[in-house]
Image: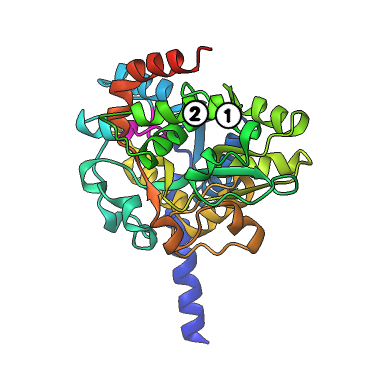
Amino acid sequence: MKVISTIAVSGLATLMATTAFAAGETITINSFGGAYETAHRACVITPFEEATGAKVQVVTAYSADAFAQLRAQAEAPQFDVIHFSGGQEIVGAREGLLSPIDPASLSNAADLYDFAKANLAGGEGPAYSIAAIGLVYNSVTVPKEPASWSDLLDKAYADHIVLTDISNGYGMLGFLMLNKVKGGSLENIQPGLDAVTELLDNGAIVVSTSPEIQQEFAQNDAWVAPYASDYAYTLRKAGLPAAFVQGKEGTPASFITTNLVAGRDNQELALKFIDMSISAKAQACFAEQLRYSPTNAKVVLDGEVAADVAYGEEAVSGLIRFDPTVIEAKRSEWVDAWNRTIAR
């Protein structure tokens, strides 16, 4: 009994010390608004506040806007933790806006796949979720289930394919994967543009936003759309028979990262927030609520959720990350070439 009591008292003391450390403190983060921010609060923000006694101030800002704010505030940063989905952490780390992270300071770092923690020491925060890009398809009306990116050019799908404009981030990644499959590279996107021309000749259409994809599936008998895994779930919630498959040639991915901002006083508390974000519990929550792919190898998902994401070591081994810095540098040039291709 004395041993049990000692353990109990010790655990209580630790909890009280953590709470005392954090009570009354505030960290400022960004989140992405809408359904994402709702899930962010449920999966990380509220559990963090309850566990530490600290408060989290949330600024709704997408990656590009958040990064612009971080740069503008370089001399007096306002964020403690900043989240990106477009690779801005690479540039931010190079510019000294983000702090290096010692993996030993994160209790959950050891459970992450290697790609999700590849440059912590360089200042690039860990990836805590992945938006996997593959083929969203109508599981009832499609004549045969797609299995590869090359299937997009199969005339069996003809005028039932929906492409997304590359002004959309997921549309860009889908296009770059098609370009890769056709023999292109980040130095040469002409094979991808030629493939788009062929698809348009076969009757494919181009939309700009995800609601337009839903409209095509609901009203115009769309069968296949290269897009993110979470959108198959969105379509099913809308009552449509949608499924998702990773193309066998590989899966382009948008890494969602959580980063430690340099020049702030409460980095220890900020690291606790980052650590909770990469936990198996938080990542399972994101997968269940949004169908984002986990980066923590200890996440356990049920069959339906697992089918919608890149799940498990074999699945994530096929993830492809096109260099975000190259995409950003060439974006205007590529968009011009894309617009000339689809103008018909």
Residue at x 60% of width, y 52% of height: 308
Query: The residue under label 2 is which amino acid type?
Result: Glu
Query: The residue under label 1 is which amino acid type?
Result: Asn
Residue at x 36% of width, y 31% of height: 191
**Placement of 317 over or under 155, stated as above or below:** below
Residue at x 59% of width, y 28% of height: 204
Position of residue 36 measured from the top left corner of the image (x, y, whole percent): 58, 36
**Placement of 266 over or under 210, stated as above or below:** below
Q: Nearer the viewer, residue 26 or 254?
A: 254
Position of residue 331 measured from the top left corner of the image (x, y, whole percent): 35, 20
Residue at x 54% of width, y 58% of height: 281
Q: Which residue is mark 2?
A: 198
Disc 1 and disc 2: Cα gap in Å?
6 Å
Marks 1 and 2 in Cβ contact (< 8 Å): yes
Q: Is residue 84 magenta?
A: yes
Q: Which residue is mark 1?
A: 202
Dot 2 crowding, Cα within 10 Å, few <14, some 14–19, many 20+:
few
Q: Nearer the viewer, residue 308 or 260?
A: 308
Position of residue 40 measured from the top left corner of the image (x, y, whole percent): 56, 41
Q: Nearer the viewer, residue 117 or 339?
A: 339
Position of residue 199 measured from the top left corner of the image (x, y, whole percent): 53, 30
**Residue 322 visible at all:** yes
User: Which segment did they paint magenta?
Assistant: 79-89
Q: Nearer the viewer, residue 99 or 181?
A: 181
Q: Residue 344 vs residue 304: left or right?
A: left
**Residue 61 visible at all:** no
Circle 2 sits in a helix, a strand or a loop, which is it?
A: helix
